[in-house]
Image (tube, rainbow, N blue to C red):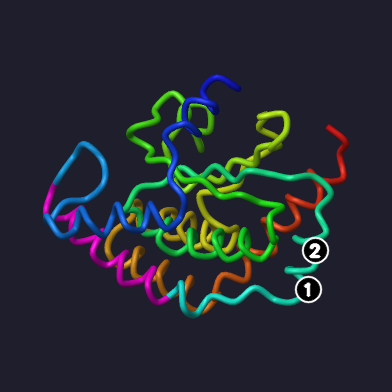
């Protein structure tokens, strides 16, 4: 696993680099990843607009900021994403704001799922390549300690319940999910991730 993580980190992007990469591809009517289609480009364009808004509006509470700054160890958040992923567009701005709020305790790096299959296969969700996936790495040891994603519990429950009732995920389900994120304002994700970080930080590695 450490080799897969090292390879991924070598080819990783900062948050700003990732945003520029996705934005530059859109100028050529493309999305990230090897598969190109009008649908994926459309989703990528929506996500670019979403992320611009969230970069301005997402807030991290003072209580969470203090706990992030108080982490004993230093960490890397290695995030697996793609520009066309709706969940990633909602969550990466949250991850970024939390990492910045930690004042150096957390360094966030992003890799593209379809360029890092070896890494993705280590962090499947129900045998699927669901993203985004946030992998917590001890910076000194280069060791993965835990992971989170692809959605906060409330969002996951919404999709699970919809699928049980309707049999599949359609555009209505996707719209309901985006509304859930809009109302939640990133708060559920922040609390879940903070709890994970505090638990990991309490274990002496």
Secondary structure found at label 2: helix
Residue 38 part of the magenta segment:
yes
Query: Which residue is pictured at 60% across the width and 47% down the height?
Result: 148
Point out the image quarter for the N terminus. top right
Q: Do the residues labelled 1 and 2 touch (CB within 8 Å)?
A: yes
Residue found 15% across the figure and 44% down from its top: 36
Query: What percent of the width, then of the height, locates residue 18?
Result: 38, 52
Instruction: Please state the extent of the stretch shown in magenta in the rendering.
Output: 37-53
Q: Place residue 203 in its image quadrant.
A: top right
Q: Position of residue 134 (x, y in %)?
A: 56, 46
Gap between marks 1 and 2, in whole Å?
6 Å
Q: Residue 194 lies in magenta, yes or no? A: no
Q: Give the labeled residue for mark 2.
A: 67
**56 vs 26: above or below:** below
Residue drawn where x is 38% and y is 38% of the image? 113
In the picture, the quarter occupied by the C terminus is: top right
Magenta segment, principal secondary structure? helix
Q: Residue 102 carries which label?
A: none
Q: Which one is nearer the viewer's eye here, 6 or 165?
A: 6
**Residue at x-position 36% and y-position 64%:** 173
Q: Where is residue 90 in the image (x, y as percent from the top left)?
A: 45, 64
Bin the neighbour count of mark 1 within 10 Å (Cα to Cα): few under 14, some 14-19, many 20 and up. few
In the rendered view, would you say 79 is above or below 34? Answer: below
The foreground one among 194 and 163 is 194
Q: In this figure, which residue is indicated by the disc labeled 1?
A: 63
Q: Where is residue 168 in the image (x, y as percent from the top left)?
A: 33, 52
Judge by depth and name the residue closer to the eye, 80 or 173: 80
Left or right placement of residue 33 versus residue 78 in this view? left
């Amino acid at each position: 696993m450490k080799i897969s993580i090292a390879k991924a980190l070598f080819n990783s992007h900062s948050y700003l680099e990732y945003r520029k990469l996705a934005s530059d591809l859109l100028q050529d009517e493309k999305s990230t990843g090897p598969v190109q289609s009008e649908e994926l480009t459309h989703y990528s364009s929506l996500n670019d607009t979403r992320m611009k808004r969230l970069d301005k509006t997402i807030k991290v509470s003072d209580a969470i900021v203090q706990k992030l700054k108080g982490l004993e160890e230093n960490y890397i958040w290695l995030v697996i994403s793609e520009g066309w992923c709706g969940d990633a567009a909602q969550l990466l701005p949250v991850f970024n704001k939390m990492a910045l709020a930690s004042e150096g305790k957390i360094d966030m790096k992003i890799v593209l799922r379809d360029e890092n299959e070896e890494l993705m296969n280590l962090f499947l969700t129900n045998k699927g390549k669901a993203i985004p996936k946030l992998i917590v790495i001890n910076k000194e040891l280069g060791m993965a300690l835990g992971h989170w994603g692809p959605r906060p519990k409330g969002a996951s429950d919404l999709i699970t319940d919809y699928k049980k009732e309707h049999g599949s995920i359609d555009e209505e389900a996707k719209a309901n999910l985006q509304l859930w994120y809009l109302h939640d304002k990133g708060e559920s994700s922040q609390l879940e991730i903070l709890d994970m970080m505090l638990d990991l930080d309490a274990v002496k590695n």
